[in-house]
Amino acid sequence: MTNPIRPTDNEARTLAKQLMGEARFAALGTVSPEGSPLVTRVAFGLCPAGQPISLISGLSQHSQMLQANPNCSLLVGEPGAKGDPLTHPRISLVGRAEAVDNQGPEHAEMAAHYLHSHPKAKLYIGFADFFFVRFALDVGYLNGGFGKAFHLSANDLAIPG
């Protein structure tokens, strides 16, 4: 059987970074302590250093699951208005969630940066139960459309801040 995964090239890296840079939400996959999967929709953005982040509530099920097991996956990329949704590019990002301390020095910078792309978050960004999660990526699985599959390393996915 022929390997369907193409060698990673600059076109794949560019598309992956474009998908991440344009995304305002993502599907987040987490695993419960009992081993049950959960997929939820979360806000998505990039921090000033270019790493994926989300602003989540500590009251949410996915937040509680990430505290117990930080391993997770994000699906980024939405179908266009026309055509088969499965032919539109998307990327699955695999890594670990790392909570950002609301009292730490990077929180204010991250919040100001985040509000540029998510202005409606101003309504709840200061709530006590909300905090930022930064995703440390291990690998990305890019589906660039029919016949365009790539595996990308953390270095391939790095976006200069």
Image: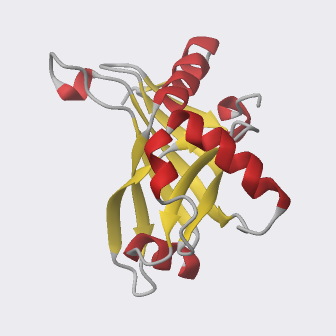
User: Residue 141: x, y in percent?
Assistant: 49, 38
Whole-percent x and y of residue 27? 37, 50
Viewer-nearest residue: 11 or 68? 68
Determine whether, in the image, residue 134 is placed left or right of residue 64.
Answer: right
Q: Quadrant of residue 106?
A: bottom right
- Image coordinates for residue 5, horizontal then vertical, percent: 47, 28
Number of marks present in the image shown = 0
- In the image as oriented, which residue stretches furthest toward the left? 83
Residue displayed at 40% across by 45% down:
26
The answer to which image quadrant residue 42 occupies is bottom left
Residue 120, placed above or below residue 21: below
Q: Residue at x 70, y 64 (%)?
A: 100
Q: Residue at x 76, y 31 (%)?
A: 161
Judge by depth and name the residue closer to the eye, 123 or 36: 123
- Where does residue 58 sit, x and y in percent of width and height? 50, 75
Q: How is the image coloured?
A: secondary structure
Question: Taking 68 as reference, is 55 above or below it?
Answer: above
Residue 62 visible in the displayed image = yes
Q: Residue at x 42, y 80 (%)?
A: 32
Give the residue furthest to the top.
11
What is the quadrant of the N terminus in the image? Answer: top left
